[in-house]
Image (cartoon, helix red, strand yellow):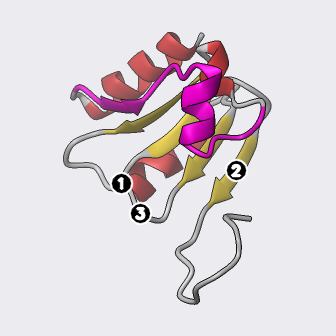
Amino acid sequence: SLVRVLKTIEGHFGRKMVVTSGYRDPSRNRRANGAKNSLHMYCAAADIQVPGVSKWELANYVRSMPGRGGVGTYCHTESIHVDVGPERDWNWRCRRRGGGGDG
């Protein structure tokens, strides 16, 4: 089902995407600071970019898709997170102050 979502995104924008993070085994997921039960460990999530498309435009499109799962944006990358789990959204903002975890 993840591949179907990714193919739909490519079809919408008419260009190939770049997968910046796909399957992660548990140790790789820990090194990536992934969620404890990250869907990346179950081949149900990918972090993607579409060349020439801003992360905001990409995220807005995926959030409009019927039956979509989670969609997240990150501070320090143009990639967005797409998964086929429960529908939810997040935007990880850049922190200007030091200290603290990644919340």
Secondary-structure class at tag 1: loop
**In the rendered structure, does residue 29 fall within the stretch colored magenta?**
yes
Secondary-structure class at tag 3: loop
In the image, what residue type sits under mark 2?
Asp
Q: Residue at coordinates 40% horizontally, 17% vertically from top-left?
A: 7
Q: Position of residue 52 (x, y in %)?
A: 20, 48
Q: Position of residue 49 (x, y in %)?
A: 34, 41
Q: Earlier in the sequence, mark 3 or mark 2?
A: 3
Q: Position of residue 1 (x, y in %)?
A: 60, 10
Q: Disc 3 vs disc 1: Cβ atoms closer than 8 Å?
A: no
Q: Position of residue 33 (x, y in %)?
A: 61, 46
> Which residue has dot 1 on it?
78
The region drawn magenta spans 16-36
Question: Which of the 4 quarters of the picture holds residue 66?
Answer: top right
Question: Which of the 4 quarters of the picture holds residue 41?
Answer: top right
Q: Is residue 64 visible?
A: no
**In the rendered structure, does residue 17 fall within the stretch colored magenta?**
yes
In the image, what residue type sits under mark 1?
Glu
Q: Residue at coordinates 58% horizontally, 19% vertically from top-left?
A: 25
> Which residue has dot 3 on it?
76
Instruction: Give the CA separation, mark 2 to mark 1.
Output: 16 Å
> Which residue has dot 2 on it?
89
Q: How many marks overall?
A: 3
